[in-house]
């Protein structure tokens, strides 16, 4: 896997643009970019996120947060979805809350599905979201 990076403090959109150009030149179908913790209350960081999406034209945008972060996570999801419409969510730390934390509220405010749940610390702990299983967990 090729890592594309620039000097610290550089333009994040330029990094993503370069990564997309590299992928195209090397017949790669996938570019994974991580915005490294955008604060939804920071207008400049959210504008950078919008710029990243303009220059990269992503096929898929996922919102990632902790299910146990409560109303803060719900507010972040709503703000991110307004700035850059998300296609779905990945919620981590769902193993820490038997009631699913903010998961249902995040799906509601974004109007988008939960795609994966993080149920631990390892790669195999990232599971595909199953709504029937999830509801069973809430009511068990």
Image (cartoon, rainbow, N blue to C red):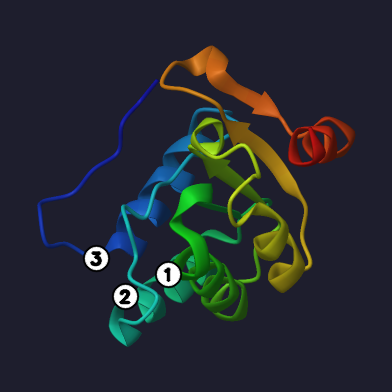
- Whether tag 2 and tag 3 are in contact, CB under 8 A, the answer is no
Dot 1: what SS? helix
> Residue at image x 24%, y 65%?
11
- Whether tag 1 and tag 2 are in contact, CB under 8 A, the answer is yes
Relative to 60, residue 97 above or below: above
Dot 2: what SS? helix
**Residue corresponding to mark 1:** 49
- For residue 45, which numbered disc appears in the image? 2
Q: Give residue 43's quadrant in the image.
A: bottom left
- How far separated are the C-alphas under marks 1 and 2? 6 Å
> Residue at image x 59%, y 44%?
90
Q: Earlier in the sequence, mark 2 or mark 3?
A: 3
* Residue extending furthest toward the right: 132
- Numbered disc in front, either 2 or 3: 2
**Residue corresponding to mark 3:** 11
| Of the pair 44 and 107, the residue shown nearer to us | 107
> Residue at image x 50%, y 61%?
70
Q: Position of residue 29 (x, y in %)?
A: 62, 33
Q: Earlier in the sequence, mark 3 or mark 1?
A: 3
- How far separated are the C-alphas under marks 3 and 1? 11 Å
Which quadrant would the N terminus be assigned to in this image? top left
- For residue 112, which numbered disc appears in the image? none
- Whether tag 3 and tag 1 are in contact, CB under 8 A, the answer is no
Q: Residues within 10 Å of mark 1 (few under 14, many from 20)?
A: some
Q: Position of residue 61 (x, y in %)?
A: 61, 55
């Amino acid at each position: 896997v090729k890592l594309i990076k620039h000097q610290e403090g550089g333009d994040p959109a330029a990094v993503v643009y370069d990564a997309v150009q590299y992928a195209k030149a090397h017949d790669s179908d996938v570019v994974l970019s991580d915005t490294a913790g955008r604060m939804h209350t920071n207008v400049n960081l959210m504008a950078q996120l919008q710029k990243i999406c303009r220059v990269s034209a992503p096929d898929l945008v996922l919102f990632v947060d902790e299910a146990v972060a409560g109303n803060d996570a719900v507010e972040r999801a709503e703000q991110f979805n307004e700035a850059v419409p998300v296609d779905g969510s990945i919620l981590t730390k769902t193993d820490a809350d038997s009631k699913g934390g903010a998961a249902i509220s995040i799906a509601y405010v974004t109007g988008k599905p939960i795609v994966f749940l993080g149920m631990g610390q390892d790669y195999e702990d990232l599971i595909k979201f199953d709504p029937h299983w999830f509801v069973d967990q809430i009511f068990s």
